[in-house]
Image: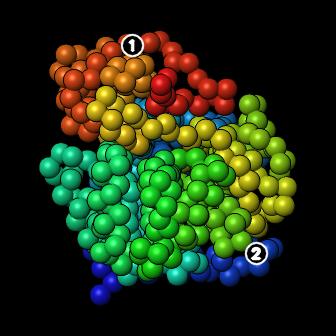
């Protein structure tokens, strides 16, 4: 039984229709495809200018015939209650709602209409099939976080069952835990590994220490897909050597879906079927292939909420070999997350703090930006920008979450700032270790 597809259908996501639409886009010749992209760009802007009061006010000087007149939106622009940003006619029953990870330090809630979300999944399914991976049948070894509060925890576990996933903890990457993880691989017929780059790299370093190639322990594994963090060439070589399978680099965002995915030729191909991706300079001018700049994305199908010329906060470069029909992402800069090392010797992925930050994310947009710094083994500083200072209740909730996800007796310093220091790229690094 195709449980994954069935679960999408039961939740109102027309996956079969989305697959048909995706196939029709992919079957277009170059001329038809270029016309399709230009048409969809104009359509989505026109739709939101007519039906979305937030966007009508935001893009009041937009000219449909001049793409460069369309303003670039940032995460800060979207940090207001979701209800104020929704398109007329889209109620909670007609949309998919989630919140961004906050990995850039700028969390907010967002919405997608149900067909847009179905198309997002159709793109993922299509790309994974290139490596003979099937969401309905391929068993996934998942190195990913999970909420620890009861309702969210069991919701994620249920989704794991539907998606044929076994979830390994990224909150504990110690040697003893890696030993237990290895035993699980011996006893399970996993088809692929998926998860945070840093967590999988730590597991590969453990395998290197053991002088073990995972493919010899678990022959059923076909591939490893890394996501959410930068993949450096040295780490890719390590993974390929000690996992013994192809390493696939995935680049995406919760609010947009899949942005780029490596093919069998090691080309990091941009998803240009339901997204339009640009590289811009600091003046919002489109840069030629090979030049480094800001990654700006337009969601061509999201009618519930505008993501039009949306600045992700990432810096990247298109390959000089790119064409409008085949955009190749050559380089992505700035998505690195350090490993957390604690007094007990325990290690955890830097994105562990994604789950801690959930306690300070509020739909009213009080906390605008935040960064977390590890000053010593047992000392962390949380710097944040907000409308109001965090109260005692919020501070206690954050400390409780840190104890739950990491370990007790850590010293946490809170500091409210008017502005946070940014990296050279202009992006906030959510977690930084000074160890």
**Residue 320 seen anywhere in this rendered image of the structure:** yes
- The number of discs equals 2
Q: Quadrant of residue 114?
A: bottom left
Residue 259 drawn at (x, y percent)? 59, 57
Q: Residues within 10 Å of mark 2 (few under 14, many from 20)?
A: few
Lower position in the chain sequence, tag 2 or tag 1: 2
Residue 42 position within the rendered picture, expressed as x and y whole percent measured from the top left = 67, 56
Query: Which label is found at residue 32?
Result: 2
- For the N terminus, which image quadrant? bottom left
Q: Hey, which quadrant is residue 391 in on the image?
A: top left
Residue at position x 74%, y 31% from top? 282
Examine the rendering and report whether any part of residue 126 can be seen: no
Give percent across and percent down for residue 172. 31, 46
Circle 2 SS class: helix
The residue at 77%/79% (across/down) is 29
Local SS, label 1: strand
Instruction: Out of 242 and 6, give the one closest to the viewer.
Output: 242
| Residue at horizontal 62 percent and vertical 26 percent from the top | 423
Of residues 318 and 336, which is closer to you in this image?
336
Residue 353's place in the image compared with 169, above or below, is above
Horizontally, residue 81 falls left or right of residue 301, namely left
Colour logic: rainbow
- Indicate which label's residue lies in the foreground, 2 or 1: 1
Give the residue at the far left of this rendering. 150
Q: Distance between the residues labelled 2 and 1?
A: 52 Å
Quick one: label 1, few (<14), some, or many (20+) residues within 10 Å? some
Image coordinates of residue 415 in percent, x first then y, are: 38, 13
Q: Residue placed at 37% from the left, 40% from the top?
A: 347
Q: Mark 1 points at which residue?
A: 416
Direction from residue 238 to residue 341 in the image, left or right:
left
Residue in the foreground of this view, choosing between 382 and 365: 382
């Amino acid at each position: 039984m195709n449980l994954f597809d069935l679960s999408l259908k039961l939740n109102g996501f027309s996956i079969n229709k989305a697959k048909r639409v995706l196939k029709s886009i992919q079957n277009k010749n170059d001329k038809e495809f270029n016309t399709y992209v230009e048409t969809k760009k104009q359509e989505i802007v026109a739709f939101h200018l007519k039906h979305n009061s937030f966007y009508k006010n935001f893009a009041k000087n937009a000219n449909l015939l001049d793409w460069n007149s369309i303003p670039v939106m940032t995460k800060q622009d979207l940090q207001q209650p979701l209800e104020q940003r929704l398109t007329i006619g889209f109620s909670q029953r007609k949309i998919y709602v989630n919140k961004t990870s906050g990995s850039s330090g700028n969390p907010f809630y967002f919405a997608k209409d149900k067909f847009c979300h179905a198309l997002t999944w159709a793109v993922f399914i299509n790309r994974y099939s290139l490596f003979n991976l099937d969401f309905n049948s391929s068993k996934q070894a998942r190195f990913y976080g999970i909420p620890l509060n009861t309702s969210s925890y069991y919701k994620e576990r249920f989704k794991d069952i539907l998606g044929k996933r076994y979830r390994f903890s990224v909150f504990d990457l110690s040697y003893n835990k890696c030993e237990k993880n290895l035993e699980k691989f011996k006893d399970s017929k996993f088809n692929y590994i998926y998860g945070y780059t840093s967590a999988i790299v730590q597991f590969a370093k453990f395998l290197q220490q053991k002088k073990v190639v995972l493919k010899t322990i678990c022959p059923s594994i076909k591939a490893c897909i890394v996501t959410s963090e930068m993949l450096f060439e040295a780490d890719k070589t390590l993974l390929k050597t000690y996992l013994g399978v192809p390493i696939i680099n995935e680049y995406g965002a919760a609010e947009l879906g899949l942005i780029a995915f490596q093919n069998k030729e090691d080309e990091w191909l941009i998803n240009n079927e339901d997204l339009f991706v640009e590289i811009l300079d600091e003046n919002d001018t489109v840069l030629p292939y090979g030049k480094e700049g800001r990654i700006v994305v337009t969601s061509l199908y999201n009618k519930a909420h505008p993501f039009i010329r949306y600045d992700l906060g990432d810096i990247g470069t298109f390959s000089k070999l790119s064409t409008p029909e085949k955009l190749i992402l050559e380089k992505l800069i700035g998505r690195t997350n350090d490993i957390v090392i604690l007094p007990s010797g325990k290690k955890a992925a830097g994105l562990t703090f994604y789950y801690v930050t959930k306690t300070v994310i509020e739909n009213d947009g009080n906390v605008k930006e935040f960064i977390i710094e590890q000053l010593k083994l047992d000392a962390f500083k949380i710097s944040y920008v907000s409308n109001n200072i965090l109260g005692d209740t919020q501070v206690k909730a954050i400390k409780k979450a840190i104890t739950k996800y990491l370990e007790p007796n850590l010293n946490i310093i809170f500091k409210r700032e008017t502005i946070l220091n940014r990296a050279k790229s202009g992006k906030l690094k959510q977690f930084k270790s000074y160890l």
